[in-house]
Image: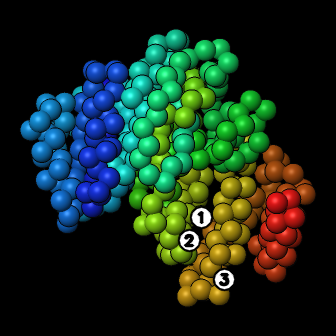
Amino acid sequence: MISIIVPVYNVETYLPTCIESILDQTYKDFEILLIDDGSTDNSGNICDEYAKRDNRCIAIHQQNKGVYNARNTGLSHATGEYISFVDSDDYIHPQMLEILYEALQKGDYDFSMVTLKQVEQYKKEDFIPSINNNNTFIVNGLNLMRRLYNINDPILKWPEINFQVVCNKLYKKNLISNSKFKQTGTEDTEFNNKIYLKTNSAILVNLPLYYWVQRPSSITHQPVNQNFIDRAYSYLVCLHEIPVENSLYRAYCLQKLYKTMINVRYHAEKTKWNNYAVSQSLTLKKQTIKEFIQNQHISLSKKIGLLLFLYIPITYNCFMLINELIHKLKK
């Protein structure tokens, strides 16, 4: 059985579509754990209504503690052999669970994964997906860690977001049962960092079966705020979880941490968050600069470039302006 964990908070407009897309799955052996995280709209009642209507739906109510805690609550109540996550404002293709489960049965893999498709609103998909040799890839922990931190990989060309999020995957429960989500700037990345370190092999299916709804109130559409700035800190959390002797994986994480610090500084400039962003980057730099410089897996040119951008922000501003100009000229 598959346990599908759906954290719910004030999404009454989107929630029915999300739940219906799960109930419409061609793979039927599942339970839906609807974790109402202290919603103040009608979301909690919607969870209860579906729980009365279908015994595969289980409504659990708790005080508002955040999506990370709601997912942990779901993990503690899950009874299935496999775990999947769906965000309550998204929806999935009718065959997503079937494809994920079928892929896992092809070998001794730790998890399976499909690709994300960004959409503005619900749209019924008529295409019938199927697994074949041209759309499946077998990968190891090295491949996964490279893409998690946006390092170019000869096998995997998919955008890094597919590897950072948890919602497009089917995990074996015994792989993640002892792992918990933490309240960081990027909970999904931190969680998958722990999982990928334990992964022997995974199977990836290049089919867009998870629909990521882009709504104005989502974090990705909000201006600079504390959560945005704290994303850099989340990579420090990831770094602490990677064994010291694994300097290659730590190099991947360090590069992402420094790129994120630079990006945060750039976007926070001329906003009320600028001083906070500068303070955070100085704190992070103090804790990591020695290892960053000494790590043999980071090229000298990257070290110089990233440190130049960090210490002299105007150089990064010029770099971004040139990139924007090139992008406009290509259009």
User: At 41% across and 21% down in the image, what residue appears?
Assistant: 98
Q: Is residue 279 visible?
A: no
Q: Quadrant of residue 123?
A: top left
Tag 2 near tag 3, CB within 8 Å = no
User: Would you name the residue on which mark 3 appears?
Assistant: 269
Q: Secondary structure at mark 2?
A: helix
First-in-chain label (2 vs 3):
2
Q: Position of residue 12 (x, y in %)?
A: 25, 57
Calculate the distance from the C-alpha at mark 2 to the C-alpha at mark 1: 6 Å
Q: Nearer the viewer, mark 2 or mark 3?
A: 3
Calculate the distance from the C-alpha at mark 2 to the C-alpha at mark 3: 12 Å
253 is higher (above) or lower (below) than 232: above
Q: Residue furthest top?
A: 106
Q: Position of residue 32 (x, y in %)?
A: 25, 35
Q: Nearer the viewer, mark 1 or mark 3?
A: 3
Identity, as a three-letter code, of the amino acid under mark 3: Glu
Identity, as a three-letter code, of the amino acid under mark 1: Ala
User: Would you name the residue on which mark 1 appears?
Assistant: 232
User: Would you name the residue on which mark 2 appears?
Assistant: 229
